[in-house]
Amino acid sequence: DDNLKSFLLSIGTSTGIENLRLVGPAGCGKTSIGQWLAQETNKRLLIMDCSVIREPRDWFGFRTVHNGSIRWQDTEFVRAVTTGNCVIVLDELNRAPASVLNGLMPLLDHRRASWIEERGAAVRVGPNTTFVATTNMGAKYLGASPVDLALRDRFSRVIEVTYLPTPKEAALLSRRTGLKLDSCTALATIASNTRGKTSGHEPISTRELLAAASDIANYGEQSLRYTILSKIEDHSKRAAMATLLAGKFPGLVSDTATTTASEPF
């Protein structure tokens, strides 16, 4: 989408307060958009895994002992924030406890600074810093929490990210894995059919397709039993998917008893 591309680049090159939140299903490329933005704007990239942050001070630093004395050690997050000219991806933002995210509030609004008592100084956001938050929303993401209204308010730009159209997704799979385009098109088509609300299947993500395409390229079509079929717990749906896959990939093992029977395989 050229309009979206231009919009993202305008954010990445702006000198104002630029916070962006990406919302969408798992494995559709939200984190990759942050990586792309850093590359296109020639900025440093830092990806923060928010799910591992458990205490508010984890963002900023910790006390350590040096030459017999206690001193404060800044985190890589602080170094990136204060240096500036950086795209900071707050990956899986709503997988951190809500209370832990409060420490980010002053960095994300007009203050662009947060006082840290142990540091004896404020952490100030450097110039040309873009914060990109990624979130999965919905009841099926059990490890995620709703995003606090005050935090949502600081991300006034929200882009809904979805899966690529089938031809573009197929081209991506082929480019990244080396698998022939016709096989990638077959994979992307099957995945597209699972993403409709009435399909009855859990959607197959682009991340999962990349694994499937890579394994087909390296091992063969039989690997689809482990990359696509094995994730389906409902046995009737697994059998239906096996039939669908066999129609596109005749090299898939014809004896699918171990993947469709009522017993686990």
Image (cartoon, helix red, strand yellow):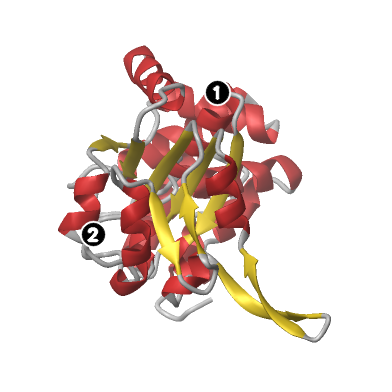
Image position of 227 (left or right of 219): left
Furthest residue toward bottom: 68
Image position of 51 (left or right of 175): left
The residue at 37%/58% (across/down) is 104
- State the image coordinates of residue 244 (x, y, percent, origin top left): 41, 45
Disc ID at residue 147: 2
Q: Circle 2 — which element? A: loop
- State the image coordinates of residue 85 (x, y, percent, origin top left): 56, 33
Q: Circle 1 — which element? A: loop
Vertical placement of 201 versus 96: above or below? above
Which amino acid type is shown beneath numbered disc 2?
A: Val
Which amino acid type is shown beneath numbered disc 1?
A: Thr
- State the image coordinates of residue 221 (x, y, percent, origin top left): 63, 46
Picture quadrant where residue 10 is located:
top left
Image position of 172 (left or right of 243): right
Vertical placement of 234 versus 263: above or below? above
Q: Determine contact: label 1, label 2, CB under 8 Å.
A: no
Between the residue at mark 1 and the residue at mark 2, the CA separation in whole angstroms equals: 28 Å
Q: Crowding near pointer 2: few (<14 within 10 Å), some, many (20+)?
A: some
Name the quarter where the N terminus is drawn. Answer: top left
Q: Crowding near pointer 1: few (<14 within 10 Å), some, many (20+)?
A: some
The residue at 62%/79% (across/down) is 63
Decide if residue 51 is in sight here.
Answer: yes
Disc ID at residue 74: none
Q: Name the residue under label 1.
A: 41
Picture quadrant where residue 84 is located:
top right
Vertical placement of 50 versus 192: above or below? below
Instruction: Indicate which disc, 1 or 2, sits on the residue closer to the N terminus.
Output: 1
Residues 95 and 43: in front is: 43
